[in-house]
Image (cartoon, grey):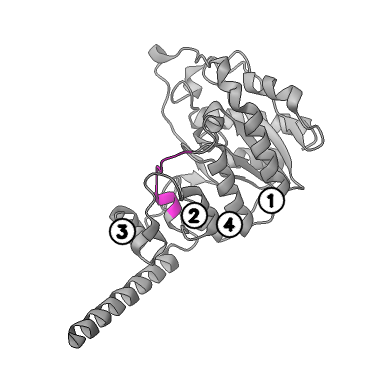
């Protein structure tokens, strides 16, 4: 019995050592690199994301803000922290992670969107790979813990990569992303004109606006109190108004917050969109330039 237990303990120790070595090897191999269009924790942790202006939001931030255009127009380094499919509380979790590895920015552009405020946090995990590279970090763990799909054992060495062989292979072969700059996920798709029609948003969708603003302000006061907030609304196809900005206007804290409206004259053109709710690369470049020009007009 003692021999069996001894052999079992030795085998377990060897497995644990192998797991630690594999985990260390993948961490070293992946340092500073991005292997998925939405997985940029390595870039942030390596200090490559330091910026004076950062963008937060869901997919309509990730696709719509070309950081190169913003940087060129504002003459300030910009970085896009947009998360595809994740609302405000999750976005703030990523911003918190960013602040662990970079100085606080001067300006945080908040892309206001109904999908970011209702609900305030996602209850399931999508695109799990974006969290794997630093899932043991408290800020990252705070995003995924409690969501359906989270595996508590993922905080153990190597275990986090179990079930993601394609991602591991990308790290091993250094198959890095080459078409993503500063978090911007470009798309060359064009909206089918037959599906081009105005998106209608129910007014009751704004019922969470006060909670949304309060959550954002509490986080700002705690983690980035000296940064300004710029609220920007990305127009849907054929938009005729920036209705969320209109709702925020009377609630604005003029000392630390500003609204950044953009011209809507281009929103009827389907060649600026990849679908009715998301811009393509062409539309993102145009929209980002408009946002930058509006910010410059306000002193930025």
Q: Quadrant of residue 73?
A: top right
**Callouts 3 and 2 close, C-beta under 8 Å:** no
The alpha-carbon separation of the residues under discs 1 and 3 comes to: 33 Å
Q: Residues within 10 Å of mark 3 (few under 14, many from 20)?
A: few
Which is in the foreground here, disc 4 or disc 3? 3
Q: Residues within 10 Å of mark 2 (few under 14, many from 20)?
A: some
Q: Circle 3 sits on which residue?
A: 162
Q: Circle 1 sits on which residue?
A: 223
Q: Find the residue positioned furthest to the front.
A: 1
Q: Circle 2 sits on which residue?
A: 141
Helix, strand or loop at mark 1:
helix
> Which quadrant, please, contains the C terminus?
top right
The mark nearer the N terminus, 1 or 3, is 3
Span of residues in magenta? 122-131
Q: Circle 4 sits on which residue?
A: 48
Query: Would you say residue 181 is visible in this rendering?
Result: yes
Helix, strand or loop at mark 2:
helix
* Front-lying residue, 145 or 21: 145
The mark nearer the N terminus, 1 or 2, is 2
**Callouts 4 and 1 close, C-beta under 8 Å:** no
Q: Find the residue positioned furthest to the bottom.
A: 3
The mark nearer the N terminus, 3 or 2, is 2
């Amino acid at each position: 019995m003692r021999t069996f237990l001894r052999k079992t303990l030795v085998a377990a120790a060897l497995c644990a050592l192998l797991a630690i070595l594999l985990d260390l090897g993948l961490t070293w191999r992946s340092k500073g690199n991005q292997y998925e269009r939405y997985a940029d924790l390595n870039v942030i942790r390596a200090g490559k994301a330091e910026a004076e202006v950062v963008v937060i939001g869901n997919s309509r931030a990730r696709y719509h803000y070309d950081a190169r255009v913003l940087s060129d127009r504002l003459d300030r380094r910009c970085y896009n922290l947009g998360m595809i499919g994740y609302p405000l509380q999750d976005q703030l979790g990523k911003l918190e992670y960013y602040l662990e590895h970079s100085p606080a920015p001067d300006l945080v552009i908040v892309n206001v969107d109904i999908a970011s405020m209702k609900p305030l946090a996602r209850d399931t995990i999508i695109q799990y790979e974006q969290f794997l590279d630093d899932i043991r970090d408290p800020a990252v763990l705070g995003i995924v813990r409690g969501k359906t799909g989270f595996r508590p054992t993922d905080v153990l060495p190597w275990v986090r990569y179990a079930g993601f062989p394609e991602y591991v292979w990308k790290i091993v072969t250094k198959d890095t992303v080459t078409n993503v700059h500063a978090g911007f996920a470009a798309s060359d798709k064009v909206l089918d004109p037959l599906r081009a029609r105005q998106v209608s948003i129910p007014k009751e969708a704004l019922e969470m606006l006060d909670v949304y603003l309060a959550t954002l302000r509490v986080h700002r006061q705690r983690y980035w109190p000296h940064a300004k907030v710029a609220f920007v609304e990305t127009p849907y196809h054929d938009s005729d108004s920036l209705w969320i900005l209109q709702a925020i206007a009377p609630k604005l804290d003029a000392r630390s917050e500003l609204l950044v409206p953009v011209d809507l004259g281009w929103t009827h053109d389907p060649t600026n969109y990849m679908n009715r709710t998301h811009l393509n690369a062409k539309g993102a470049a145009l929209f980002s330039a408009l946002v930058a020009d509006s910010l410059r007009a306000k002193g930025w």
